[in-house]
Each structure stands twice: as structure tokens, then as C-alpha cells.
Image (cartoon, rainbow, N blue to C red):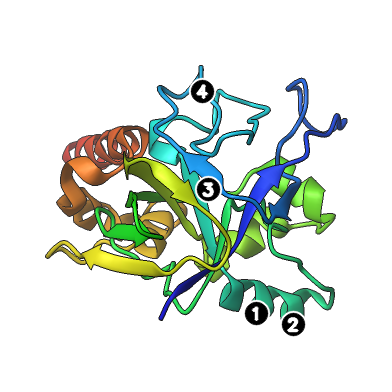
Amino acid sequence: MPELLSVNIAVPKVVDYTDAEFTGIDKRPIDTMVKIVAPGPQGTADSGLAGDRIGDKRFHGGDHQAVYAYAREDLDHWERELGKPLANGSFGENFTVAGLDVNGALVGERWRVGPDVLLEVTSPRIPCRTFQEWLEEPGWVKRFTQAARPGAYLRVVRPGEVRAGDQVTVEHRPEHEVTVALVLRALSGEPELLPRVLAAGEALNPEHAASVRKRLERRAVARDA
């Protein structure tokens, strides 16, 4: 049975590789119950976890990036690749899960976490410079992207409380085949996949949906020129 191994909350840090006041990428597991809520629009909100602060609200946090989940199995993969230990939370994820194919999660897929919380997959993680500098791995943005192991952002459908050890149940999978890994690939170097992404419908993060439509329009114009 898929399991929530740890719930990870930010320890804000002031760093020189972001122009935000601080970064919240340094997330640490906590043992207590954590309240999960819909945080509000991006640009004004933190994440969906009570007490988890977002440093750069321009690009992180908000309803469609309320919770970021990453699989322990993928962290184990990167431990082998990078040759260093990666604790739960090392990638800035809120939920470290086990027994769940996070990269193969479909946009619009719904997860019940514990007895009450219901979440919906919205998008992949798009790596940024802060992530690269945090890991101290040159070329990390390209390497992470090419591996197509992005983890998943989720929005809060039904709030509640969670804690480490809760079961994760996939309660609904839509009929399309748009995984978070496919969305990342389409947006980062495989434009032939772009037409497939819109099959995810309204569940897709609106910013990504808008980006896909703009790219498809530019391709159409280029073909007609």
C-alpha cells in the first residue's frame, strides 16, 4: 500500500542565489499532525501545509502548487546517481511517499491521504536555479529535466490533517494518458508532445495550459509562414 513516509516543512534560509527574501526549499520532516488547506492564488499564498513558507511566491505556492510530492524510490535513484545521501525533503518536497509512481501520475488523478485529505494532481515540477544551487550540482536543471522524474504538484480538493505513516490511496484516474512526466517532456524539449497535453483538460495547472496553447499557436504560425 502506498504510504506517506514523511511530511516536510520549510526551514526558511537567506541565500545569495535568489532575489527573494528567503528560500523555503530546505524542508525537514516533522512528526506532528499537519493541517492541509487550499492556500489561495499564486503570488499571495504559501503552500497548502500549515507552517510551510514559500520564499518566492511569483513561481511557487498557491492553489495549483499546494503540495509537492516526490517518491522515496526516485530519491534513492538520485542517491546512486549523485553519490550522496538524500534525506526525505531533500528536493524541497512536502510529501515524501513510497510505493507510488509519482512521475506516472495522471493530471487530474486524485489521492486520498489519511482518512480525510483529498488531493488532485495538477502538474510536474519545473526545475529552477534555486533547486540547482541548493543541491550544489552544476548542470542539475538540465539533468533533472532530462531524467523526467519531476514529482507532482497537487491542489487541495478536501482539506484535513495528515501525518507521516498515513496511507495514500489513488481514488480516481482520468481516462486520458497525460502524466506529469509527459507534461515536463512536452514543455522542455519534445514539442511534438504538446498537442497531447491539452487532453488533461481543466485539471492542468492554468499556467502550463496557457504555455502549451501559446507554443502550439507559434508552431502553427511557423508552419503557415
Report which residue position mark 4 lands on.
45
The quarter in which the N terminus is drawn is bottom left
Q: Which mark is residue 77?
A: 1
Q: Which mark is residue 126?
A: 3
Which circle's residue, 2 or 3, is located before the other in the chain?
Answer: 2
Between residue 107 and residue 7, name the one nearer to us.
7
Q: Residue at x 78, y 39 (%)?
A: 11
Mark 2, residues whose alpha carbon is within 10 Å: few (<14), some, or many (≥20)? few
User: Which quadrant holds residue 12?
Assistant: top right
Position in image of residue 146 (x %, y %): 55, 66
Taking the image as shown, residue 8 lies to the left or right of residue 58, namely right
Position in image of residue 215 (x %, y %): 31, 39
Residue type (three-letter) at the residue carrying disc 4: Ala
Position in image of residue 28 (x %, y %): 74, 52
Taking the image as shown, residue 84 lies to the left or right of residue 193, namely right
Q: Which mark is residue 80?
A: 2
